[in-house]
Amino acid sequence: MSDRGGDYSYTTEGPEVAGDRKSGFMGLPALGIADRFAALPLWAKVPIVLALVSFAFYLPFLTILPFAYVRTDLSSGGSDWGGVLFVVVIYMIVAIGLNVVIGLAGLLDLGYIGFYALGAYSVAIFGSPSSPVTKLIAEKFGLSEGWAVPFALCIPIALAIALISGVMLGAPTLRLRGDYLAIVTMGFGEIIRILSRNVDAVTNGPAGIIGVPRPPEPSENYFSSIESAHWYWLALAVLILLMFMTRRLEDSRVGRGWLAIREDEDAAAVMGVNAFKFKLWAFAIGAALGAIAGLLFASKQAYVEPTGFALNLSFLFVAMVVIGGSGNMVGVMLGAFLITYLPERFREFQDWRPFAFGVAMVLVMVLRPQGLVPSRRRAKEFEDRKHEAEEAAADV
Amino acid sequence: MLLKLEDVVLNYGKIEALHGISLEVAEGEVVALIGANGAGKTSTMRAISGVRGLSSGRITFNGEDVSKLRADQRMRKGLCLTPEGRGVFPGMTVTENLDMGAYTRKDKANIAEDFDRVFGLFPRLKERRKQVGGTMSGGEQQMLAIGRSLMSRPKLLLLDEPSMGLAPMLIQQIFSIISEIAEQGTTILVVEQNAKQALSRADRAYVLETGRIVKTGTGAALLDDPSVREAYLGVA
């Protein structure tokens, strides 16, 4: 019999109840918007979703005061509103991709920028007529000058490269747990960036690659770099598609496997979940989503160069997931929105940005460690770990 | 023999936790493994379930060598471990936890049947179907962990310290349920610190001391053994 005393099983019930009451933001009770929405009948859900989607598509034209104050181009030094919206959506795609890795499978990936860069560079290397690779191919096979792989073909190429590199990175490293994995992935992010700067024969080195192809256009110059609103719509459509796909994945057998691994890897194994295989899947799927975001971004910029993929972006991506609420897709999208949008909206206070960011990080971690819109499961796991730590401390 | 361990050695880094364990479990038996804290009970369970790899030795299950298989592969062969302590998935509800037990199965109709069976054994779980695992009491979590293992229809159920941290009344209850599961035809290997309960319920038992098996016999014989009584039952 354990010396922890017989009434142990009753003591755990007390603090749990108290913990639930505290779950709102800064002591306020939780709103439970997600619960209320889930409880609605289908005929009410569909119009709400449609209204939200239409509003999102309408955003570039938002001029009605006072709502127009959300725009970033009100003052003369402001940034292009459509462009900001586009970047917000790109980072939302990044956030839901990284959320598969961190939030669903529970793997800390600090090198996610690597996959983003791979997506961007894939479309540039194969799709741009001025990249060293397409020039070489055109020369070898006597193709006309200005030949390049069509945009539509660049997408599967980028996905394949991301998937393969995700598996290549994952296969040897996913046996590591926790901190070790974080360090190795961080190294991966740096390797990709350094390669992009130094392998001139493929990436054209620090000069970068111009002429990244655009998606097929409905009319001429529809997707030129200055038509940010069009790019925003395209990215938004991709985001919505990916949201549906990842949600389906989350509820699938694979999603349940990830959940089990994250909560208790050994228990998952004795339930018949092959942890390694599922982690590899998470890595590969996350890599593919990151690559799609990078591909869209490079295509709008029409230009890629190594400094655009610095390591600090990786940390920013992780911050989006953690602040927003790891494991909750809506949460991580909110995190991506806040971290991308706020600095653009309040450009006047640019000098204060690192300070404000630091304070915000500390506040969120102190008041709301599970994130702004936490996943209910993750919140419970959080409490469980805390209990475990307390029990371990009490045992000593 | 359903399960056979031959000279199993298990290391944690440089520390040898098991120095060559040999034991056997026949089909239909309830076998107990008793020992003090740190004797290697949980290590033995980890070795059998495949959560930790062996340093040397051999484990055969149903006549097949499973020593090199991963935990999930051994589970598919019918070897299911109920881990010690808080072994449930804390963020999943009771139903979702039980569903995880049937993760490798595709026979939907039988799964529904097994849900009924588990809820029959543990009416408490049925009441708390929608509650999240991490918020349940220690006793309920233990019931849930056992129920989850049953959902996989194991040939051999490995129970690691089912009484850990439970109130005396609950311990009684858990052990009666274990006997009931055995009567329904599941072979059980149970590891326990609560030697009295374990020995009185088991057909046979092994006594483990510092990574070695020092005694074996029927549960009743060991209950009467003076050295066992002194060391594990607190009776001189």
Image (cartoon, coloured by chain):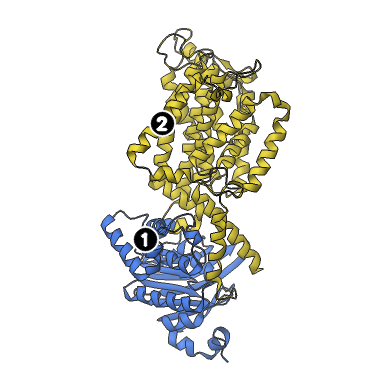
Chain colours: A yellow, B blue
Dot 2: within a 10 Å radius of its alpha carbon, few (fewer than 14), some, or many (20 or more) residues? few
Amino acid carrying label 1: it is Lys
Q: Position of residue B116 (x, y in %)?
A: 31, 64
Tell me: residue A351, above or below residue B17: above
For the residue pair A129 and A329, the one nearer the viewer reads as: A329
- Name the subunit of mark 1: B
Q: Is residue B61 visible?
A: yes
In percent of width and height, residue B135 lies at 50, 60
Q: Amino acid at mark 2?
A: Leu
Judged from the image, the secondary structure of the residue bearing numbered disc 2 is helix
Residue A241's tag is 2
Residue name at image x 66 percent, y 17 percent: A77
Q: Measured along the vertical axis of the image, is residue B108 above or below residue B173?
A: above
Decide if residue A126 is in sight here: no
Q: In this figure, which residue is indicated by the disc labeled 1?
A: B77
Neighbourhood count class around disc 1 (C-alpha, 10 Å): few under 14, some 14–19, many 20 upward: some
Q: Are marks 2 and 1 on the same chain?
A: no
Q: Position of residue B198 (x, y in %)?
A: 46, 79
Q: Is residue B217 above or below residue A11?
A: below
